[in-house]
């Protein structure tokens, strides 16, 4: 497809683009203060080779594993491609915890040999110092990560910045790489473990990235960016779509403009995003996929009234899905169970996690993402959420996604998530967490009304009343200004649960 072959590598593909379409834009990066970095395919290959020289002078060699802590930026892109051209492996992430407890397991598992960090990122540096005592030494020593050899500082903001330094380098020699070499180690959103994959670039358009503006100006910055760059299609997650829809002032200032296509997914997609069709986009495409298997299915909508909760459409060419029960037996249409994906070989396993890999691949050629779903009579896949989001109440498992969809219809609700809070008798009980609709004309959220809606929902849902079923009806509703999100824009349910527990004073229970 698109000229790719089984023998392609990152190096061969970058070289191919630089020769066949050298002046085609490959990468645009825009900052809130108006800076714009642009690279054609020829420039991208040249700068990537120069970045490889810069890294090689800092002792990065073939088969090394480089952890890049530089955020999404031109610098991160060149570090990633430069590492690949050296025949080394890269994994890109950001530090979330002050003590580095989120990156330390990744470094151990990945046998990281070098870390690249922005020298102005004090949070990342402080986190590294918790387990690397001689951070600035030419050769570092870490008992926690024995494989680590060096920490490389990337200067992003001074006159002698990384980009200036790289541009002054000679184009380095290209390492002899094989399609079977591991180029990128991805992090999965649920487990925090690393997925060992062979990565080949397959984007043939121009990718536009941006530095996130502060919360107050983010919506305007993003809208202006989409218009100014004449974006044809944009991947926008549901929380951001709702943020844009809440800004009537931005939507009304230019009623003639709309995106040709918005692609959304990343979490259970509900009808509340249907309002994007018209004001924001001509077409909304709901996609389902995962890091391990890639793009699996999609459903395209051009009429907001046709949008259906959780519908992710039919599998794309080359992919297949089925729904199975707890014994991995395929179930009839309209029966809920677990998704199984017949994958394309993209996923080769979880790095140094044979038990987890075996659990995720119980049948040859099939991947088990632990997503709850069903397939209707027309063959559309409906994905309701992750098994890990289920709330255990005694012997009952409560899956919150359908209740959340019901509550999204309540006045004043911008976003909602139901999380577990501790209970001395039943281990957990559900707690409704809600974000107020920020539009000035929106009604105010009334927690008691939401709890009443929960009771009505469960009264209609349960065929038999029992103690655990009664406990499934939330008795607590908390209103938040915003939910904690991960770098990919997904709600961090664990962090939200911790906030709820803290607000309710349940830490000591």
Image (spheres, rainbow, N blue to C red):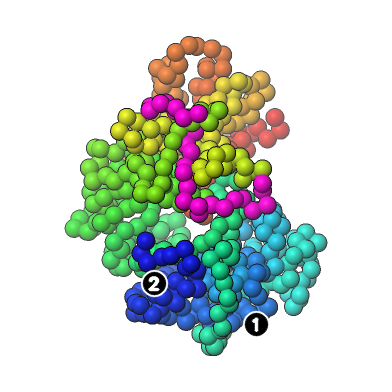
Magenta stretch? 329-354
Give the crowd class for mark 2: few <14, some 14-19, many >=20 residues within 10 Å: many
Q: Residue at x 44, y 77 (%)?
A: 15
The x, y position of residue 232, in whole percent, is: 29, 61
Q: Which mark is residue 186?
A: none
Quarter of the image where the C terminus is located: top right
Q: Is residue 285 left or right of residue 111?
A: left
Check disc 2 and report the residue beneath it.
26
In magenta stretch: residue 347: yes
The x, y position of residue 281, in whole percent, is: 26, 52
Check disc 1 and report the residue beneath it.
57
Q: Nearer the viewer, residue 393 or 12?
A: 12
Q: Nearer the viewer, residue 86 or 267?
A: 86
Q: Residue at x 43, y 80 (%)?
A: 43
Q: Is residue 96 left or right of residue 333?
A: right
Nearer-N-terminus badge (1/2): 2
């Amino acid at each position: 497809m698109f000229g790719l072959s089984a023998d392609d590598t990152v190096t061969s593909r970058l070289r191919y683009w630089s020769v066949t379409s050298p002046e085609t834009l490959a990468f645009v990066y825009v900052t809130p203060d108006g800076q714009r970095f642009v690279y054609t395919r020829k420039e991208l290959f040249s700068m990537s080779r120069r970045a490889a020289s810069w890294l090689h002078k800092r002792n990065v060699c073939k088969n090394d594993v480089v952890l890049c802590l530089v955020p999404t930026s031109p610098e991160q892109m060149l570090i990633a491609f430069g590492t690949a051209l050296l025949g080394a492996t890269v994994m890109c992430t950001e530090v979330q915890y002050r003590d580095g407890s989120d990156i330390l397991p990744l470094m151990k598992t990945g046998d990281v040999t070098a870390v690249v960090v922005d020298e102005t990122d004090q949070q990342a540096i402080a986190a590294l110092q918790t387990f690397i005592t001689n951070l600035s030494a030419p050769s570092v020593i870490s008992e926690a990560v024995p494989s680590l050899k060096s920490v490389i500082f990337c200067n992003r903001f001074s006159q002698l910045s990384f980009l200036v330094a790289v541009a002054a380098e000679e184009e380095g020699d290209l390492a002899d790489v094989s399609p079977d070499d591991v180029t990128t180690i991805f992090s999965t959103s649920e487990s925090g473990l690393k997925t060992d994959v062979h990565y080949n670039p397959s984007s043939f358009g121009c990718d536009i990235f941006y530095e996130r503006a502060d919360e107050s100006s983010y919506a305007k910055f993003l809208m202006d960016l989409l218009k100014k760059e004449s974006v044809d299609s944009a991947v926008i997650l549901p929380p951001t779509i709702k943020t844009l829809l809440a800004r009537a002032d931005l939507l009304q200032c230019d009623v003639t403009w709309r995106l040709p296509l918005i692609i959304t997914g990343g979490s259970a997609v509900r009808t509340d995003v249907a309002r994007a069709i018209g004001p924001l986009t001509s077409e909304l495409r709901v996609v389902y996929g995962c890091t391990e298997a890639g793009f699996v299915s999609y459903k395209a909508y051009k009429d907001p009234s046709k949008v259906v909760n959780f519908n992710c459409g039919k599998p794309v060419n080359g992919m297949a899905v089925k729904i199975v029960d707890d014994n991995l037996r395929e179930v009839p249409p309209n029966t809920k169970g677990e998704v199984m994906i017949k994958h394309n070989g993209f996923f080769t396993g979880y790095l140094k996690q044979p038990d987890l890999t075996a659990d995720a691949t119980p049948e040859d050629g099939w991947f088990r993402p632990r997503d709850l779903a069903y397939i209707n009579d027309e063959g559309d896949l409906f994905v309701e959420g992750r098994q890990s989001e289920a709330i255990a109440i005694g012997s009952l498992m409560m899956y919150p996604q359908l209740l959340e969809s019901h509550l999204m219809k309540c006045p004043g609700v911008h976003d909602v998530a139901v999380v577990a809070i501790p209970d001395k008798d039943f281990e957990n009980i559900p707690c409704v967490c809600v974000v107020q609709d920020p539009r000035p004309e929106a009604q105010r959220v009334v927690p008691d009304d939401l709890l009443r809606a929960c009771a009505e929902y469960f009264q209609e849902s349960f065929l038999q009343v029992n103690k655990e079923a009664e406990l499934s009806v939330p008795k607590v509703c908390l209103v938040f200004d915003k939910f904690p999100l991960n770098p990919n824009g997904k709600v961090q349910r664990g962090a939200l649960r911790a906030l709820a527990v803290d607000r309710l004073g349940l830490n000591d229970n």
